[in-house]
Amino acid sequence: MSPRTSAVAASGQWTDPDDGIRYPSGEVHAWEQGRNEAVCGLSLSRSRLTRFPHVSWADVQPESGRHAEEVQAVCRRCRAGLGGRRDERPWTRRDPRP
């Protein structure tokens, strides 16, 4: 599964007032169409996640900024499952030991 073929499932949705298309909001997960679970193994129906087959995984990343306006969190396990890099850590080492 690649980031280009993965769609999005999210905990919420918002509608763009200009074009009337719904987009994901809240926590987003990567989802392969035809399956009832996210890449991280979370069941979509039990978790009450809404599917967005018209939105690709790459479009909801905060770095892209395309459809990530209302996205609050990106699932770390889904990002890692689709090849997220390990060196994108949010922390930095301060005062390392000699």
Image (spheres, rainbow, N blue to C red):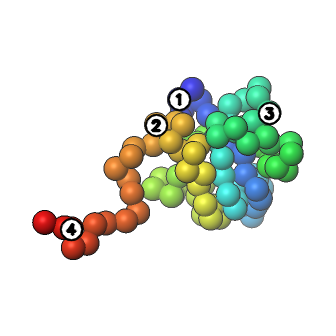
- Separation of marks 1 and 4 at Cα, in angstroms: 37 Å
Looking at the image, is mark 3 or mark 2 earlier in the sequence? 3
Mark 1 touching mark 4, by CB under 8 A?
Answer: no
Q: Give the label on residue 36, or none.
A: 3
Residue sitting at the far left? 98
Position in image of residue 20 (x %, y %):
77, 56
Position in image of residue 34 (x %, y %):
77, 26
- Separation of marks 3 and 2 at Cα, in angstroms: 21 Å
Residue at image mark 2: 83
Q: Secondary structure at mark 4?
A: loop
Kind of residue sitting beneath label 1: Ser
Position in image of residue 41 (x %, y %):
70, 38
Foreground mark, 1 or 3, reads: 3
Mark 2 touching mark 4, by CB under 8 A?
Answer: no
In the rendered image, the quadrant that contains the C terminus is bottom left
Foreground mark, 4 or 3, reads: 4
Looking at the image, is mark 1 or mark 4 earlier in the sequence? 1
Looking at the image, is mark 1 or mark 2 earlier in the sequence? 1
Residue at image mark 1: 2
User: Could you tell whether 37 is left or right of 7 in the image?
Assistant: right
Q: Secondary structure at mark 2?
A: loop
Foreground mark, 2 or 4, reads: 4
Q: Residue at x 62, y 64 (%)?
A: 72
- Foreground residue among 90 and 14: 90
Q: Secondary structure at mark 1?
A: loop
